[in-house]
Every structure is written in C-alpha cells, then in structure tokens.
Image: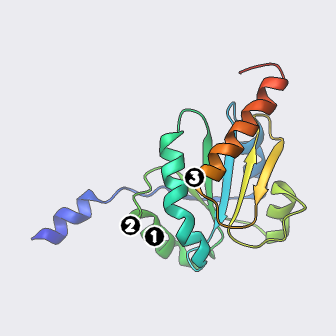
C-alpha cells in the first residue's frame, strides 16, 4: 500500500483568506522586507515561476517574508490546496478575499491587475519594485538587495 504512505508524506497546507486590509497590515508591520506574489492555478506563467518563488522563499526565510496570495475564487480552495501540497509548500499562504481594485490599491495603483504579479516592499511598507511578469530567483534576490538598501538608508536594521 504505497498510496497511504504518500498521503502522510505530503505537507499540510495552511491556506487562509486574506483581505486587502489584512495584507496592508502584513506589509507595514513586517520587520523584514516583504515579497508579495499574486498568482492563480489557472495562470500558466504563475505555475511556471512557482518553483523559483518557493526556492527563493526557502533560501531567504530569515531575511524576507514571502506572502503568496492566490487570486483563485474561493470555490476553488481545494484545487489551490492541492496545487500547494503537490509543490511542497508547507508555510502559510493566502486566498484573496476582496475585490481586485482593493488589492491593486494596497499593492500599487500602477499595477494593471495582470498575473503573475510580484511586489517587493522594504520594512515599513514602502514599495521598492514590482514585476507584472514571471520572476526568477535572481530577480527576487536583486529586488531584496534594493529593499535592504532602503532599510539601511532609513536608519539601519530593526
């Protein structure tokens, strides 16, 4: 019986709804830079970039907070959980709970709403850079360096 053993090996997925107000609070209250990635299971570029995002999150977990926000509809929750489980995501992730316009207002009014979208914030919530395309681990590492520079200019590490 291989199947039951495999079920126990899959990570437990922690997926919770996230409103724009809660997202703003997460970004502003973090003592570390924050990377917010908005994605969906139906978005091919999102699926393609996902391994790079997870690799970045794991290799920089002490230096940055990575916030994954699925733009899938809430009735697709099980599909989102399955997607995350299959990719070994074992940290808290979020399901968008609010209008696109509200999320755009929180993340960047310059964002068209296209997916995938990745936003890098300095500690305190200042937007450093955003990508409205697939990102690589290298893109994220360079953006993290920019966020650290903003942090240093504002008085050092917290």
Where residue 107 appears, as percent x and y from the top left, is 81, 56
Q: Residue at x 63, y 67 (%)?
A: 39
Foreground mark, 2 or 3?
3
Q: Quadrant of residue 114?
A: bottom right
**Mark 2: few, some, or many residues within 10 Å (few <14, many ≥20)?**
few
Q: For label 3, count other residues whose C-alpha is less than 10 Å away and answer few (under 14), some (14-19) or many (20+).
A: some
Asked if marks 2 and 3 touch (Cβ < 8 Å), the reply is: no
**Which residue corresponds to mark 3?**
137
- Image position of 47 (left or right of 82): right
The total of numbered circles placed on residues is: 3
Q: Secondary structure beneath disc 3?
A: helix
Label 2 or label 3, whichever comes before in sequence order? 2
Q: Are marks 1 and 2 in contact (CB under 8 Å)?
A: yes
Judged left or right of residue 19, residue 49 is left
Q: Which residue is mark 2?
A: 86
Q: Secondary structure at mark 2?
A: helix
| Image location of residue 87, percent across then percent down | 41, 63
- 56 versus 48 height, above or below: above
* Residue indicated by mark 1: 83
Measure the C-alpha gap from mark 2 to mark 3. 20 Å
Q: Residue furthest left?
A: 1
Could you tell whether 76 is left or right of 4 in the image?
right
| Screen quadrant of the N terminus | bottom left
Which comes before the other along the chain, label 3 or label 1?
1
The one nearer the camera, 112 or 52, is 52
Query: Which residue lies most toward the right here?
Result: 109
Q: Secondary structure at mark 1?
A: helix
Residue at 66%, 70% (x, y): give it.
Answer: 71
Q: CA distance from mark 1 to mark 2?
A: 5 Å
**Residue name at image x 44 percent, y 56 percent:** 89
């Amino acid at each position: 019986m291989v199947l039951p053993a495999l079920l126990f090996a899959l990570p437990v997925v922690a997926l919770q709804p996230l409103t724009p107000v809660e997202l703003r609070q997460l970004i502003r209250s973090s003592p570390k830079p924050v990377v917010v990635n908005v994605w969906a299971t139906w978005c091919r570029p999102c699926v393609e970039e996902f391994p790079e995002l997870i690799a970045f999150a794991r290799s920089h977990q002490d230096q940055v907070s990575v916030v994954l926000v699925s733009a899938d509809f809430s009735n697709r929750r099980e599909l989102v959980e399955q997607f995350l489980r299959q990719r070994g995501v074992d940290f808290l992730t979020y399901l968008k709970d609010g209008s696109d316009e509200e999320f755009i207002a929180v993340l960047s009014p310059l964002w068209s709403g296209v997916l995938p979208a990745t936003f890098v914030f300095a500690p305190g919530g200042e937007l450093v850079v955003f990508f409205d395309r697939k990102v690589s681990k290298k893109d994220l590492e360079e953006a993290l360096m920019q966020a650290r520079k903003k942090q240093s200019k504002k008085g050092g590490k917290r």
